[in-house]
Image (spheres, rainbow, N blue to C red):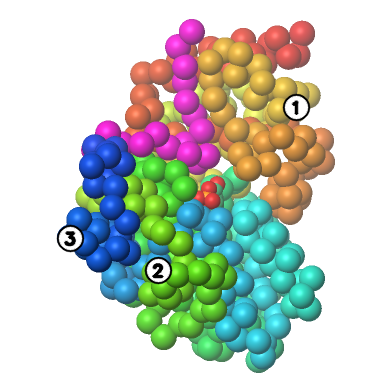
Amino acid sequence: MKPYYLDYASTTPIDKRVLSEMIPYLKERYHNPSSMHLSAIANKKAINEAREKVARAIGATPKEILFTSGGTEAINFAIKGFALKHPNKKVIITTAIEHKATLKTVAFLETLGYQAIYLSADKEGFIDLEELNNHLNEDTLMVSIVYANNEIGTVQDVEAIIRMCHEKKIVVHLDAVQAFGQIPIDVKALDVDLMTLSSHKFYGPKGVGALYVKTGIELEPIIHGGSHENNLRAGTENLSGIIGMGKAAELVIAELASIQKHYRELQADFHARMIETFPDVKLIGAPLGEKRSFNHLSYSFTGIKGHELHYQLAKLGISVSTGSACSANEITPSHVVQAIHLEEERQPCVIRITFGKYSKLKDHPQIIRLFQKAITELKA
Ligand SMILES: Cc1ncc(COP(=O)(O)O)c(C=O)c1O
């Protein structure tokens, strides 16, 4: 059975060029970057080169990049770290369609006495800028928004959001985990304050991410220990992971134009085939175009459950997702499809298909045939 991987938003395979840069740091270059001997100092230098690569990829300066254990930790650090450093303000604004890393971080802060405002989203997954504006005031601590939604692919108008927040001097954190590697991001042009990246979403290794912290923005550390990462994030560095993330960031930016072109072709072709083959299928989230992730399609069906289709497809060698992979074992409709008010009967029938640079257009006819087989079997 030939496997077809259509779950790149969940994670990407590592690029071979990234892996080969990492291997020496797992073997002979194992030295602790905090030690003072020569090999260790060379490793510290290698970390700072990786930091430069990540910084360059988003238009930041190296000292504005802090390495973390991934997107989840970077989000926790951005929100908790900023909240703890600025205890005089207690209102956090976010949206009802965030990744769980944001929602649970904010919910945790609510247990400590913070107040959370969850902005609503329309049927396509866009937040209402007027609603945001109405909530911004002197009590607002910060705004945290997902740039490109992992479940429905909607890309928010982050320029307008940041402009609006800055008019009232309110700090913005962007969860750019799904956006980076698809959309060119220049943190200086955007003027964003805090931004989260995760390496395994752009052909780098898992378990490493970064938080961009604009010069002048102060955070309280949330992981205590040694003086790593400029005294802000303790713990011996994930040396090979950081080297890999640096290389992955460098490659994805160098190849962004061709990646975008490939994603768009895959997306347009697959979508055309889906709507032609399954008349009852409904695209969820923003329409194809600039306001949707280029590698992302999410559909709802009628009369079949998303998790059953997911399982049936898996038996035929196709990997998709029923929403956020992090909540894949929950069979209740995801918080995102509920928040965008998808018709109730369609809510449990959602699947997500995401492409990547190793996806092949020529596989689409066979994948669609396997979808037909899976759906026919489920409806039988
Ligand atoms: C939008 C978004 N934010 C945050 C995360 C968490 O990132 P990580 O897997 O690196 O912890 C994910 C992962 O799926 C995501 O899609």
Query: Residue placed at 24% from the left, 58% from the top?
Result: 40
Task: Label 1: state its secondary structure.
Answer: loop
Splitting the image into 4 quarters, where does residue 85 fall? bottom right
Residue at 66% x, 21% y is: 311
Dots 2, 1 in contact, CB < 8 A: no
Distance, label 2 to label 1, CA atoms, is 47 Å
**Distance between the Cα atoms at labels 3 and 2?**
18 Å
Single out the mark in the foreground, 3 or 2.
3
Identify the residue position indicated by label 3 in the image.
38
Mark 1 = which residue?
A: 305
Vertical order, 97 against 211 (above or below): above
Picture layout, residue 267 above or below residue 193: above
Amino acid carrying label 2: it is His
Q: Is residue 52 visible?
A: no
- Give yes or no for residue 6 being in the magenta stretch: yes
Disc 3 marks a residue whose amino acid type is Leu
Above or below, comparing residue 115 to residue 25 in the picture: below
- Tell me the SS state at disc 3: helix
